[in-house]
Image (cartoon, rainbow, N blue to C red):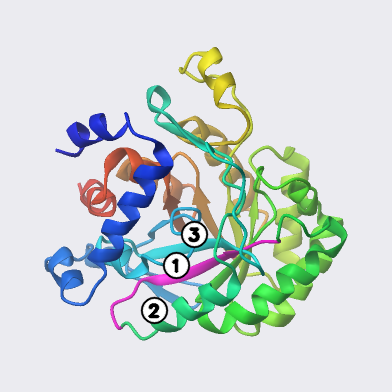
Amino acid sequence: MYPALFALLRRLDPEWTHEAGMAVIRAAGLPGVRRLVAGGWSPSARSATTVMGLRFRTPFGLAAGFDKNAVAVAGLGALGFGHVEVGTVTPKAQPGNPAPRLFRLPEDKGLINRMGFNNDGVDQMASRLRSIRTLADRPIVGVNIGKNRVTPAEEATADYAYVAREIAPLADYLVVNVSSPNTPGLRALGDVRQLEPLVEAVIAEAGSTPVLVKVSPDAADEELREVAEFVASSDLAGLVATNTTVRREGLLTPAETVKRMGEGGVSGSPLASRSLEVLGMVRGAVGDKCVISVGGVMTGSDVQARLDAGADLVQAYTAFVYRGPFLARHIDREMAA
């Protein structure tokens, strides 16, 4: 049924359809409706896992960027996700980059986005997280944090520390995002020499809330190993591998079509190979710290492959667009089979 619906939706503006879908998912999270949506379904009992001292009903979750403002967590939980990573959230609200800024690559089962950390700001996020924490059936909630676009790189630490201070008591874990390609200068903060003081400031504000760092698939292997070794020796809880890629090699979509779409990060199937490669590279280097694998995860087999390669948790985003709202249930059935 969903493939037929998607054939219609793909004719519409991707960002508009995303917002329309979010409205439906928000409604699915309302009291009473949430119970109907869940319909008594629950993931396989053997799926439950404990990571970072947190109990996840399933290792499969939704990556940051889908629910940027923590408005649909209850609905996403009812749809079966074991955890939802919201954000990226910044100290002040910001509109992000000019539209159009989200594009589909259906031939590749991928997306290109250059959203640019559009979000309602930390105060609105905190208010919503307070409400979410009262829900007995909520999924684990991670918060992806960043800096405002207008904040110079040399002042970025203050932005991250401020968001951590306001959000950490309301989140199950935090993710320091220094790897998005859509905020100028942000990826430079992923260099260990700049990352270390930034992370130390966030950890100091986070208290007992676990903190992870999200890495770029476009970073050189040596740089990724340095970051992984830093994670192992620090008070970080782990890392998330990986963000989107600016590379365009190997796409099935015609090059001229991709060129017209312009800049932005590619997600979905084109990222799968590199994301799995990075997972293998960092798993041993971080020791017993948590590794969340994301990038090109489309099926239950993909999730199992990431777990077999050493991931503690696995996330998807683009698969939700291409496979529909019951993705988490499809994944669970495929893994059980």
Front-lying residue, 327 or 117: 117
Tag 1: residue type?
A: Ala
Label drawn at residue 132: 2
**What residue sits 43% from the left and 43% below the top?**
15
Label 1 SS: loop
**Cα–Cα span, label 2 and label 3:** 15 Å
Q: Residues within 10 Å of mark 3 (few under 14, many from 20)?
A: many
Q: Which residue is mark 3?
A: 68
Label 3 SS: loop
Q: How far across and down, in percent of the image, does residue 144 sit?
A: 57, 63
Label 2 SS: helix
**Cα–Cα span, label 1 and label 3:** 6 Å
Label drawn at residue 70: 1
Q: Is residue 280 left or right of residue 29?
A: right
Q: Earlier in the sequence, mark 2 or mark 3?
A: 3
**Cα–Cα span, label 2 and label 1:** 9 Å
